[in-house]
Structure formats: structure tokens, C-alpha cells
Image (cartoon, rainbow, N blue to C red):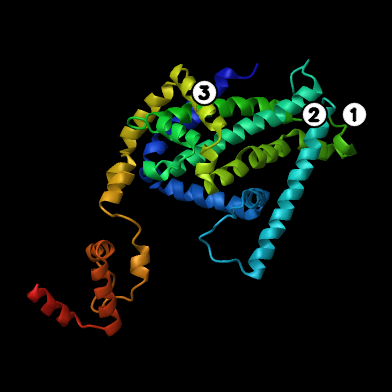
């Protein structure tokens, strides 16, 4: 039994209702103290370095593609770089050990895999399902990365264009629909992967993996090693690559194929309860779509509502003002002559009284 009822319960109650809302109401969804708490908790886990080998794999993919990963963070100091690479090596060692123990259990038939499944098939199934989960995890990140882009910015690759056209068709209903189908696939795969990777060796019988102590074997049986493998190789690594190269990721024909599969699963209605729960959650929480706050990508372009940080940081504070007025920053971004004029005022330290005289002339 694969726990089909538990799969539906886990998906609809624990995941899908929130994902459906978050796909269109990102700003409202993260505007809570619990989101801040979750963020800092995740950052604390990331700081531990247990999953840092994922960064190394991401960098390797970038190097292989001839597109090194670009970062907005300042260059690391020697101490920071040493600490970073120490955690990468530590994480790689943990991953290697986890793989060795799990594969030993698979090849010797000491897992909770169903009886009658050959050991070689179990190994193939393990890597195949992890690849499927990784692809689906990366798709989610890539879809959100391009969700706020204009159509003209979504590349020219045929499958990337077909994927985006299908995903954002109409009012964008297919994006949360994909989230439902995707989660059904991911949870189903993880339930099977859990059986493949969970060791079933009874301590004390002399059959411990690599001859470890009974205490160590008891720890192995708890499934933490399989969790490390699936988290790094079946989730985080794919997400990091997709976040760095979202358009290239969408150019993969398999992305379009799995998008169709996920939308078909959602269309069966097997998890339609998630829509009801999401609607109730949205009404209670007062969520609104992101477009209410920031408009669509085309609307932002028409109003020239780009990032104003470069404009503000390029200038010293105006005399008589503690911060630059928002209206002035917007006008500067629209009219280069105004931008140059304000630069000259800042450089020459023009007094506010001179601005008043200028206003009277206008």
C-alpha cells in the first residue's frame, strides 16, 4: 500500500491550499510574522552547511554551461570563503556517506522496498524518481521566476515559449493548477522514495551496514540519510540551478511534458478540495493578487515603474530634504534632463530658497 489516502490528505491540507494562494498573492502571503520566522529558521539551517554541496553543484552547472553564477552579494573575504568551502566539503562528505549506506542497503535488499522488486530495479527506480522530483522542484522555481516578466522577456526557445503560453494563459489559472498537479506527483514520488531509501536492518543480528555498531545501525534505520540524499539531489540542487537559469530550464522539452501531466492530474479533480480550502483561506486572510499592488509587467513598463535604487544612490541628499521625494525620483527616471538638473543642484549645494524661486518662475 502506498498510502494513497495519506498522499491526498498531506497534499490538500498541508500544502496545496497555501500554494494555490501563494502563487498569485506572493506579497500578502509573506507579509506575516510567521513568514519572517520561517525565513530565519531556514537561514539558520542553511548556515549549518549540511546542504552546502548544492552550491558547488550549482556552480559546476554554471561553469559547464559557460555562464558562471552571478551574485549581488559583495565578494567573500578570505575568512568567509574558507568557511564556505569548509561547509561544502563537510556537506559533500555527508552526502557521499549517505549515498554509500543507502546504495549498500539497496544492493543487499535491506530496505523497506516491496518484496519481489529486484535490487537493480530498486536502484534504478531510486534515481529515476529523484530526477522526476528534482525536475518538478526546479519547474516550480523557474515558473515563479518568469511569472512577473513581460512576454518579450521570456526568451525565444520554442519550448520555453510554449510552456509560458500554456502556464500563463487567461487569468493565470494554470499556475496554481500546476502547483496542485505538481504536488500530487512530488508527494507520490516521495512516498515511494521513502520505501526505497529506508533501511530495514535489525540491529544485533550481525547484518549491520558496513559492520557498524547497533546504535549506528538504529540511527541509519531512522531514514535521515535518505532524507539528506533526496533533499540535496532531488530538491535543492535543481532549485538552485533553476533559479540561476530559469529560461534555460524552461527550454527543456521535459518541462513542457510534465507541465501537461500536472495539469491533467489537476483536471481529474482528485485534489479539487484544495481550491475550496484556498478560497476560504484567502477570504479569511484578506489576500489580494500581486497585480493589485504592483500591476502587471506591462503596466509597470508603461508607467516606467522600474527599480529606482540606482537613481537615488547616484545622488547625494538634496539640500533641505532628509530623503528624496518619490515623485521627484520618478520624474528623474522619466526625464534625463531633470535627472541631470538635480545632480547639479546636489553638487552645487543649492539652497531650498533657490528652489522656491524656481517654483515661482514655473
Observer-nearest of 111 and 148: 148
Front position among marks 2 and 3: 3
Q: Mark 1 or mark 2: which is in front? A: 2
Q: In the rendering, at what x and y percent does residue 331 appear?
A: 23, 63
66 or 5: nearer the viewer: 66
Residue 161: x percent and y percent? 44, 35
Q: Nearer the viewer, residue 283 or 25?
A: 25
Q: Gap in Å between the C-alphas at discs 2 and 3?
A: 29 Å
Above or below residue 180? Residue 315 is below
Q: Which residue is under mark 3?
A: 261
- The image quadrant that residue 87 belongs to is bottom right
Q: CA distance from mark 1 to mark 2?
A: 18 Å
| x and y, in percent, of residue 39 in the image | 50, 50
Q: Residue at x 66, y 60 (%)?
A: 84
Marks 1 & 2, CB-CB < 8 Å contact: no
Is residue 50 visible from the viewing direction of this image?
Answer: no
Residue 292, above or below 339: above
User: Mark 1 Cα within 10 Å, few/some/many (few <14, many 20+)?
Assistant: few
| Residue nearer the viewer, 155 or 176 | 155
Identify the image quadrant of the N terminus: top right
Report the disc number at residue 205. 1
Left-right relation of 285 to 345: right
Q: Residues within 10 Å of mark 3 (few under 14, many from 20)?
A: some
Whether pointer 2 and pointer 3 mark residues with C-beta atoms closer than 8 Å, the reply is no
Amino acid at each position: 500500500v502506498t498510502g494513497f489516502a495519506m498522499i491526498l490528505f498531506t497534499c490538500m491540507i498541508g500544502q496545496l491550499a497555501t500554494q494555490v494562494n501563494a502563487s498569485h498573492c506572493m506579497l500578502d502571503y509573506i507579509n506575516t510574522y510567521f513568514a519572517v520566522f520561517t525565513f530565519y529558521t531556514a537561514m539558520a539551517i542553511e548556515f549549518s552547511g549540511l546542504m552546502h554541496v548544492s552550491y558547488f553543484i550549482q556552480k559546476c552547472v554554471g561553469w559547464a554551461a559557460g555562464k558562471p553564477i552571478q551574485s549581488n552579494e559583495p565578494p567573500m573575504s578570505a575568512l568567509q570563503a574558507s568557511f564556505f568551502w569548509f561547509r561544502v566539503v563537510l556537506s559533500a562528505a555527508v552526502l557521499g556517506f549517505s549515498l554509500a549506506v543507502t546504495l549498500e542497503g539497496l544492493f543487499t535488499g535491506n530496505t523497506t522496498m516491496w518484496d519481489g522488486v529486484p535490487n537493480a530495479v530498486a536502484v534504478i527506480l531510486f534515481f529515476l524518481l529523484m530526477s522526476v522530483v528534482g525536475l518538478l522542484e526546479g519547474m516550480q522555481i523557474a515558473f515563479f521566476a518568469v511569472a512577473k516578466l513581460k512576454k518579450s522577456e521570456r526568451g525565444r526557445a520554442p519550448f520555453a515559449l510554449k510552456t509560458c503560453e500554456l502556464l500563463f494563459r487567461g487569468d493565470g489559472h494554470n499556475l496554481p493548477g500546476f502547483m496542485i498537479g505538481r504536488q500530487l506527483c512530488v508527494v507520490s514520488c516521495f512516498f515511494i522514495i521513502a520505501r526505497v531509501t529506508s533501511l530495514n536492518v535489525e540491529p544485533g543480528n550481525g547484518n549491520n551496514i558496513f559492520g557498524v555498531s547497533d546504535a549506528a545501525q538504529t540511527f541509519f534505520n531512522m531514514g535521515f540519510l535518505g532524507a539528506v540524499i533526496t533533499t540535496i539531489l532531488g530538491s535543492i540542487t535543481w532549485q538552485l540551478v533553476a533559479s540561476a537559469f530559469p529560461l534555460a530550464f524552461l527550454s527543456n522539452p521535459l518541462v513542457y511534458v510534465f507541465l501537461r501531466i500536472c495539469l491533467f492530474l489537476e483536471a481529474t479533480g482528485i485534489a479539487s478540495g484544495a481550491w475550496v480550502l484556498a478560497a476560504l483561506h484567502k477570504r479569511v486572510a484578506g489576500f489580494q493578487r500581486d497585480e493589485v499592488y504592483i500591476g502587471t509587467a506591462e503596466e509597470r513598463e508603461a508607467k516606467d515603474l522600474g527599480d529606482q535604487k540606482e537613481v537615488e544612490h547616484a545622488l547625494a541628499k538634496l539640500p533641505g530634504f532628509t530623503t528624496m521625494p518619490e515623485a521627484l525620483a520618478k520624474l528623474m527616471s522619466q526625464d534625463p534632463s531633470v535627472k541631470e538638473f538635480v545632480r547639479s543642484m546636489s553638487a552645487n549645494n543649492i539652497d531650498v530658497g533657490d528652489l522656491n524661486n524656481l517654483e515661482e518662475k514655473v
